[in-house]
Image (spheres, helix red, strand yellow):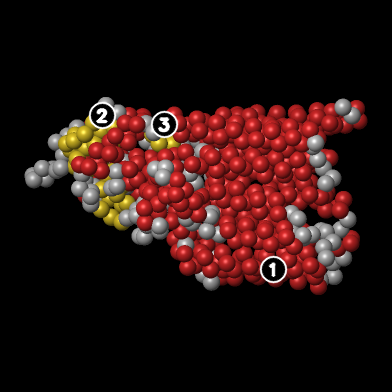
């Protein structure tokens, strides 16, 4: 009883540790996050009018199609009286820190030790990648929370009707929350159907529940995507296969697996648990080797089909791989529990499957930095039971050599990641820290420029101008060509007709700040580079008038003379 009380106190303490770490950056800058301007616009609009903006003319064309996180924060802002700006900036750390509770629960269950639960929650709360990612308002962070609670119930759904009902409700709630989270839920159910059909004896009720839940969630997701998320359908689903084939593929796969497992002459009893464990451990080891090779390949040649290039800053994330890799190798050699085999197998296979689809199709939604938060769910679980199990084995002489091999492999792999730099994790420069001076400029823009004017800038400042200044902006659509113009003729042509999320427009103003001059943020899959000095010098010509500056941010009006440039 006393131990349970201290365990609870420890998890509560980790909540506050997690919260403190996630509040550091939002409290250090006026705006924290690359798309916070857009997020503020949506939250404020919903708080004011009780609905999503339509049409939505910002960069994130699918943001309003998956509105759960914006509705949650908008409702809180309306009822609490706290401003939308404050809720947008500080609300997510309070929500995302709650994940330490389900993480500790699963970690404790995996390892059979309270220490395993504490280590799992600690890794999630303090890991560099998760801290940065979950401190920013985003649909995927809320989706991550729904996924963890879903896994908690789904793993018991075969034995408990209550768990089955709750897991299905959570799966349905994921649909309007986050598109990729819904894909993970469907993959989890599909992989479990394969598992129950071929590798483990399962009663008919368990198999039926799995099929019912999988078909129901898949059908509801397809209906929702078709009716409420047309942009997502265009950017994601239709790139896998043309309609309606892409919508029929899941049902064909479900029927194939179900009837193959039920009616083909496959004796499930011939698949002993030790055999299925060896198969699972074998594929995990294969993925481990393939991942190491992929890091080397991507570092040397970039990501196939998508122009992603390694960022040296990614190397700082590599040390966080050491403890999870201890868990991977412990799992391969020593794991015997069905629960952890199933959970680790499902998560790892889901991550690999989604990245593989992105690898071969070029779908930008599936590039590695889109799924890294789900990869870190798996890594946190591996820390929980892997480290505890490895430490226990160290005191057994017959296993000590295996412990040494495990630690050696983990260190070698982590060193490799540092050496070659991982392109699977987006760099810190993409996070979008914005100082107060940029908000001052946005406020000036809101009061002193025409409402129908369009601004040219990079991704981060375009979001600020759109959300806090209330003006259309180019983002990378038109911003990249403008700030990489080869000459004055090229620059003027780009300004006279530029692409924006709202369509083609004439640029009326240009905004740059000191950070953008040194490190312009356009595409998330490319390094941030300085604006060419030739372009900056063009802004000093008589085609442009400096209408505002505060020493950090400067606004230029594009005001060509009556006599055209020759």
Calculate the distance from the C-alpha at mark 2 to the C-alpha at mark 3: 17 Å
User: Nearer the N terminus, badge 2 or badge 1?
Assistant: 1
Marks 1 and 3: in contact by CB < 8 Å? no
Helix, strand or loop at mark 3: loop
The quadrant the C terminus occupies is top left
**Mark 2, residue position:** 550
In this orientation, does residue 286 appear? no
Closer-to-camera residue (550/321): 550
* Residue carrying label 3: 29
Question: In the image, 521: left or right of 326?
Answer: left
Q: Quadrant of residue 381?
A: top right
Cα–Cα gap, marks 3 and 1: 48 Å
Q: Position of residue 219 (x, y in %)?
A: 59, 68
How far apart marks 2 and 1 lie (CA) works out to 61 Å
> With 488 as the anchor, is 241 left or right in this view?
right
For mark 2, does the 10 Å Cα neighbourhood hold few (<14), some (14 to 19), or many (20 or more) residues? Answer: few
Residue 6 appearing in the image? yes
Within-10-Å neighbours for mark 3: few <14, some 14–19, many 20+? some
**Which element type, helix, strand or loop, lies under badge 1?**
helix
Q: Mark 2: which secondary structure?
A: loop
Name the residue located 29 percent from the left edge and 47 percent from the top edge.
470
Is residue 75 depicted above or below 468 in this figure?
below
Vertically, is 62 above or below 527?
below
Which residue is pictured at 28% across the width and 55% down the height? 504
The residue drawn where x is 27% and y is 39% is 443
| Left or right: residue 34 compared with residue 139 | left
- Residue under numbered circle 1: 212
Which quadrant of the rendered structure holds the N terminus?
A: top right
């Amino acid at each position: 009883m006393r131990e349970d009380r201290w365990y609870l106190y420890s998890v509560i303490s980790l909540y506050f540790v997690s919260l403190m770490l996630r509040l550091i950056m939002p409290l250090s800058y006026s705006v924290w996050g690359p798309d916070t301007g857009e997020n503020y616009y949506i939250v404020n609009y919903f708080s004011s009018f009780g609905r999503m903006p339509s049409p939505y003319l910002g960069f994130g064309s699918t943001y309003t199609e998956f509105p759960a996180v914006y509705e949650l924060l908008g409702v809180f802002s309306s009822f609490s009286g706290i401003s939308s700006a404050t809720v947008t900036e500080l609300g997510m750390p309070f929500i995302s820190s709650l994940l330490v509770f389900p993480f500790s629960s699963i970690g404790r269950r995996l390892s059979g030790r309270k220490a395993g639960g504490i280590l799992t929650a600690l890794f999630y709360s303090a890991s560099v990648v998760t801290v940065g990612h979950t401190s920013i308002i985003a649909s995927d962070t809320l989706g991550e929370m729904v996924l963890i609670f879903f896994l908690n119930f789904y793993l018991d759904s075969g034995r408990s009707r209550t768990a089955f009902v709750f897991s299905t409700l959570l799966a349905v709630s994921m649909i309007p929350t986050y598109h990729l989270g819904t894909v993970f839920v469907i993959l989890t159910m599909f992989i479990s159907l394969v598992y129950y059909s071929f590798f483990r004896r399962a009663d008919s009720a368990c198999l039926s529940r799995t099929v019912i839940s999988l078909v129901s969630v898949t059908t509801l997701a397809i209906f929702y995507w078709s009716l409420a998320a047309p942009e997502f359908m265009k950017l994601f689903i239709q790139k896998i296969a043309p309609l309606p084939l892409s919508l029929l593929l899941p049902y064909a796969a479900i029927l194939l697996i179900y009837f193959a497992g039920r009616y083909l002459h496959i004796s499930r009893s011939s698949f002993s648990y030790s055999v299925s464990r060896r198969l699972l451990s074998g594929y995990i080891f294969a993925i481990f080797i393939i991942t190491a090779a992929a890091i080397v390949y991507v570092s040397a040649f970039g990501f196939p089909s998508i122009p992603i290039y390694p960022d040296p800053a990614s190397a700082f994330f590599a040390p966080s791989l050491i403890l999870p890799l201890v868990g991977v190798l412990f799992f391969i050699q020593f794991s015997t529990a069905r629960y952890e085999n199933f959970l680790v197998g499902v998560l790892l296979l889901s991550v690999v499957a989604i990245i593989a689809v992105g690898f071969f199709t070029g779908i930008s939604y599936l590039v590695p930095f889109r799924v890294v938060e789900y990869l870190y769910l798996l890594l946190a679980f591996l820390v929980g039971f892997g480290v505890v199990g490895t430490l226990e084995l160290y005191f057994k002489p017959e296993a000590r050599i295996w412990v040494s091999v495990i630690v050696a492999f983990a260190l070698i792999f982590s060193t490799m990641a540092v050496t070659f730099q991982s392109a699977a994790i987006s760099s810190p420069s993409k996070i979008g820290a914005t100082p107060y001076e940029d908000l001052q400029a946005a406020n000036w823009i809101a009061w002193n420029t025409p409402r129908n004017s369009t601004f040219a800038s990079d991704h981060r400042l375009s979001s600020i101008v759109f959300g806090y200044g209330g003006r259309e902006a180019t983002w990378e659509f038109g911003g990249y060509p403008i700030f990489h113009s080869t000459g004055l003729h090229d620059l003027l042509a780009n300004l006279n007709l530029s692409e924006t999320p709202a369509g083609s427009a004439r640029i009326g103003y240009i905004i740059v700040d000191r950070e953008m001059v040194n490190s312009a943020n356009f595409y998330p899959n490319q390094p941030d580079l300085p604006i060419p000095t030739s372009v900056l010098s063009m802004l000093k010509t008589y085609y442009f008038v400096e209408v505002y500056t505060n020493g950090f941010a400067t606004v230029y009006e594009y005001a060509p003379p009556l006599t055209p440039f020759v």
